[in-house]
Image (cartoon, rainbow, N blue to C red):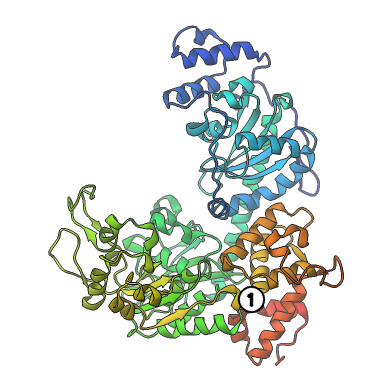
Amino acid sequence: MTQNTNGVTDFSIPRSPDAGSSAVALRSDYDETTVTRAWECVLEGSRHSSVSTLPIRSTINDSWHRCADGGINAQQDHAPIETDREVVEARSRGSWELLEAAARPFATIGRMLDGTGAMLVLADKDGVLIDVIGDKRTVFDGKDIHLGIGGKWTEDVVGTNGIGTALWTGEPVFVHAAEHFCAGIKRWTCAGSPIRDPFDGKVIGVVDLSGHPDIFRPHNIALVTAAAREIERAIADSQTAERMMLLEAFLASANNYRASDGLLIVDRQGRAIFHNNVTLPEGRRLGNGLRPSSMSCWSPELTGSGFLDTLATSLPETMRDCNVCPLELDGDIRGAALVFQKNSRGRTVSISRRPSERARDESSIIVGQSKAIRAAIDIACRAAETDDVTSLLIEGETGVGKELFARLIHAGSGKQTGTPFIALNCGAVTKELFGSELFGHVPGAFTGASRDGKAGVFELANGGVLSLDEIGEMPLDIQPFLLRVLEERVIHRLGESRARPVSVRLVASTNRDLKEEVSAGRFRRDLFYRVSAVTIHVPPLRERGDDSLLLLEHFNRKLAERRDICPLEFTNEALDALQAYRWPGNVRELRNLVEHLHLVARDRVIGLGHLPAEIAEVPGLIGSAAGEGSVLSFAEAERQAILKALAAEQGNLSKVATRLGISRPTLYRKLEQFGIKRSYA
């Protein structure tokens, strides 16, 4: 691997590495009969017999014994694979930094692999494949063994292989043909190199070159090692650039910051990237202490108080008394500054954003300008700022974004930043565990109870907001207990007589018609009236007019920025079809479609042929679009949306930014880009 005068990495096939390198100690005298005999000895349990005299690389021999000791099925012919599309896409979203850094080297190497019989794959830290590129025939053949996106290739599930063994050893690994542990994979050869986070050196993924045995070359391992280093450099550059931008964002907004104050700046992954007058947290990463259910709060897509509140609650006790300031880049909250202000006595002063400000932060992630969605947002903001409203009901079809409204209510609540937001999906809890999940239990309260006892979600949400999703799924015999807690504001853990006071705002949500559920006897009438004192109806996407195109542009731009590629462009026919479609899966379905199109589109222009049949074949659209093949750029669609918003808000730029779901700096930049005068009304 070399760099040309323009600083661009050259991925032409490098020379074979020195034979003395322990990381790439490959045997040139590979003999399949000998390797197979050694493998059979391992399966027979001959750890110390004649197998030790056979010329097998120690990396392979050690891995085989780990697999045998771990009970791996040696006759296995494929890896396990995740087939749930939403789960796979969620994993990809969680690996945005790795995918973004790998985009350039993968594009460069991918162009070289067509017709070579080789494929390049990217796996995350769990050994799950998140990107695949290369020779089309080989990529197709890889599907037979689940060497594709969603496939899991750790040693503990599929035996010795380039990905899993590289993850285990933390070193570049070459596994050729019969050296694989599982028989069904021995017709493949692979070379994998781990990718490490420049921040703390942890392995965060593997880049692997795979194909049929005839692609074997000793320098394959040098190629993937070079690619891994290039990805690490891209991550380091990205982290450095973001660090500088976050520092600049803080300095631009630090009106009351004094040099004597303590300062800690973290990025959206919870990494402490700058500190002054404050002890750096152990491990330099604040996200490690987050609850498993809250890990999604570190997603690059989540902005607003969800990020800030999760950060605040994950801080050590000694750091809780601080001012948590959001740091925005391009309209998104990408980090936070923790300012420890000192008064004249040297004591820390805690400052918090006003509820209305937090509500505006959160409402900005609900994209849309239709009257229906703005009306729902307005009700949510007004209800959130009223302390008298202790219970709310959010109604809406699956996929409309009910959780965003629950977080909006939490953001606007009249409490300090850092109050908890706890969510429980009632549809995911068994009837037997409902009481324990809601109210907690004492040690030994029932068979299987935690020996240390457990707090329920009401206790965890004390002082904040409890979101009960799909409340219509709650068993009928549990509902009276929920009603009593809402009225008496105390809970009793299972098996305990002690009353524990709780102050919780309940936000219930459902995709059912609870009035019908009441009539059918499946939901208590008194509980319905208790939780529905304020009801927010989140409209389905089909009732939101042009919001579908705004959301299309929003998701398209977000994905393009994340992968550092150009946004997709859509033909007029495709846009007509997307706008006419009824979207039964609502916003979630639209987001998933855009992610799918980004994965499959090669020429970046989306026509009717790229869309699913149920969208492309909307009655009345086929043959009706004018200008065959013409393309409407998103820039023009964006310009029109801004003009409409300016007219609707009579030139009030703050309201225009809120309506469009972008920050004021982003709006200013767009006005300049499109040559729109700020005085436009």
Residue 197 coordinates in the image, percent (x, y): 55, 46
- In the rendered structure, the answer to whether residue 174 lies left or right of residue 629 reads left
Residue 89, how many percent across, how many down?
A: 57, 54
The quadrant in which the N terminus is found is: top right
Residue 661 seen in the figure: no
Work out whether 190 lies above or below 136.
above
Foreground residue among 479 and 184: 479
Q: Residue at x 68, y 53 (%)?
A: 599
Q: Could you tell me residue 591's position as x and y percent? A: 61, 63
| Among the 4 quarters of the image, the one containing residue 670 | bottom right
**Is residue 274 rendered to the left or right of residue 118?**
left
Location of residue 561 with respect to 143 vertically, above or below:
below
Q: Residue furthest front?
A: 520
Asked where in the image residue 260 lies, by quadrant, the reply is bottom left
Mark 1 element type: helix
Residue occupied by mark 1: 547
Left or right of 399, for residue 645: right
